[in-house]
Image (tube, helix red, strand yellow):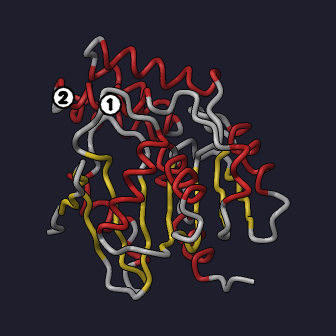
Amino acid sequence: MIKIETVKTDTFSMDFFRFGHGGQTLVILPGLSVQSVMPSAEAIRQAYGIFEDGYTVYVFDRRKELPAEYSVYGMAEDTARALDALGLHKTNILGVSQGGMIAMALAINNPDAVEKLALCSTCARVLPAQFNTIQKWVDLARAKKARELYLDFGRALYPADVFESSRELLTGAAKTVTDGDLNRFITLAEGTRDFDVEKDIEKIACPVLLIGSRDDRVLGAHAVLRTAKRFESRRSFNLYMYDGYGHAVYDTAPDFKERVLRFLREKRI
């Protein structure tokens, strides 16, 4: 059983778990979720088992004590402080969706703290059109419609066949949602509004891998491709676009983890 740990600073605390026994560090920053991913620690460990021999893997939640307003920039600052408190320096980071936005902001403000950056289903700027789907989720959460929220969330993230096969699981999960979960979700989701680091991308000094799917129904493939244009002049940038795996390509593409692992193992030129 994986132990959920808590790192504490003078202003906040943040849950995380770790697995693996490798000499290098991989930090995973998950995306926006209706409920914390911490109860899914064992499932995540199994999904990312190929990293265990070469890496010690840390998976971080958002801070426990949420302020009334909490932007992605604040999430990045808090994550950087949590890493520092744990003595984690020059780490490899995998950020997905909102976690990818956090990872970019963290790498921009702490360019020497990141060895390599793998990003998936994310973008450097959230335009109003990209926020529309998230706004719908916020509205459902405010109306305390947990079942509708979970189903709409799953429908947007996954290909149709995966969503249909997961419908019963999503409906069951919705029954466990508390008002506290919904309030937390609203704060975290609202934090994505107007996120924009496009002009600061050049401050990211490390090699970058960006992965997306052409049928992303949350941010849209164009958001990923627009972000790629900010990186494309760099020698140390790679883009890979899947087709047919949806926004949650990090869960659905069978070779996603292997692709990230190959990137992390590549020698820096």
Provide residue 112's location: percent of width, then percent of height.
Answer: 57, 71
Rendering quarter of residue 169: top left
In the image, what residue type sits under mark 2? Gly
Task: Check whether the beta carbons of the residues at disc 2 and disc 1 lie within 8 A of each other.
Answer: no
Q: Which mark is residue 180?
A: 2
Q: Say which residue appears at 36% left-offset and 78% top-offset.
A: 56
Can residue 58 be spotted in the picture? yes
Q: Nearer the viewer, residue 117 or 89?
A: 89
In the image, what residue type sits under mark 1? Phe
Q: Secondary structure at mark 1?
A: helix
- The total of numbered circles placed on residues is 2
Q: Say which residue appears at 34% left-offset and 33% top-offset.
A: 167
Provide residue 117's location: percent of width, then percent of height.
Answer: 58, 65
Rendering quarter of residue 31: top left
Q: Which mark is residue 185?
A: 1
Rendering quarter of residue 269: bottom right
Provide residue 138's location: percent of width, then percent of height.
Answer: 39, 20
Q: In the displayed image of the protein, which residue is found farthest to the front?
A: 10
Left or right: residue 268 versus residue 48 is right
Dot 2 or dot 1: first in sequence order is: 2
Q: Say which residue appears at 42% left-offset and 77% top-offset.
A: 25
Q: Secondary structure at mark 2?
A: helix
Q: Nearer the viewer, residue 142 or 108?
A: 108
Check disc 2: other Cα within 10 Å, few if <14, some if 14-19, many if 20+: few
Mark pair 2, 1: CA separation: 8 Å
Which quadrant: the N terminus? bottom left
Q: Nearer the viewer, residue 84 or 209?
A: 84
Q: In the displayed image of the protein, which residue is found farthest to the right?
A: 233
Q: Say which residue appears at 44% left-offset and 72% top-offset.
A: 26
